[in-house]
């Protein structure tokens, strides 16, 4: 079963987004209520076998400011989709159906 992986460095971020795999990153903050609300939904999607080809990752914007700035994160939660170093999609907000549609689009 897949898990959500926390990103702990800018080099990890670069390696991951350039890996050739579809990567969905949840930019969140511990003080963000909507982030805490959507987190279990993101984790459930990550563990769904239907989405096993997708890498699910979380970035704490307070701890990884360089990644957040590089990705121009202005609101939380923000979900970005990357593959081969390219940003393919963005979803902002704690709306479970919208997040599910985003993930399904790249499955």
Image (cartoon, helix red, strand yellow):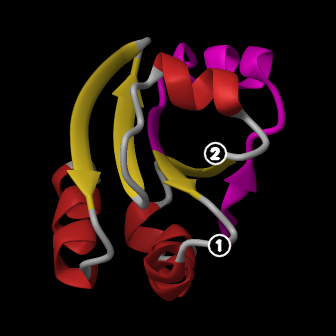
The one nearer the camera, 53 or 57, is: 57
Image coordinates of residue 96 in percent, x first then y, are 28, 82
- The quadrant in which the N terminus is found is bottom right
Q: Residue at x 71, y 46 (%)?
A: 62
Residue position marked by numbered label 1 in the rendering:
31
Q: Is residue 26 left or right of residue 83?
A: right
Residue position marked by numbered label 2 in the rendering:
61
Q: Is residue 11 within the magenta segment?
A: yes
Image coordinates of residue 68 in percent, x first then y, are 55, 31
Residue 72 found in image quarter: top left
Mark 2 surroundings: few (<14), some (14-19) or many (≥20) residues within 10 A = some
The one nearer the camera, 21 or 100, is: 100
Mark 1 surroundings: few (<14), some (14-19) or many (≥20) residues within 10 A = few
The one nearer the camera, 21 or 14, is: 14
- Residue numbers of the magenta segment: 1-24
Q: Can the viewer see residue 16 in this picture?
A: no
Q: Is residue 76 left or right of residue 7?
A: left
Image coordinates of residue 16 in percent, x first then y, are 63, 25
Q: Residue at x 18, y 81 (%)?
A: 97
Q: Is residue 106 within the magenta segment?
A: no
Q: Is residue 29 left or right of residue 76?
A: right
Q: Residue at x 50, y 73 (%)?
A: 35
Image coordinates of residue 95 in percent, x first then y, are 24, 79
Badge 1 marks a residue whose secondary structure is loop
């Amino acid at each position: 079963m897949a898990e959500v992986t926390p990103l702990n460095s800018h080099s990890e971020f670069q390696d991951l987004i350039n890996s050739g795999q579809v990567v969905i990153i949840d930019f969140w903050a511990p003080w963000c209520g909507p982030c805490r609300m959507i987190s279990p939904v993101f984790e459930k999607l990550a563990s769904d076998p239907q989405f096993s080809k997708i890498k699910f990752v979380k970035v704490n914007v307070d701890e990884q400011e360089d990644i957040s700035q590089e990705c121009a994160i202005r609101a939380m939660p923000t979900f970005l989709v990357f593959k081969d170093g390219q940003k393919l999609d963005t979803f902002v907000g704690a709306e479970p159906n919208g997040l599910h549609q985003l993930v399904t689009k790249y499955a």
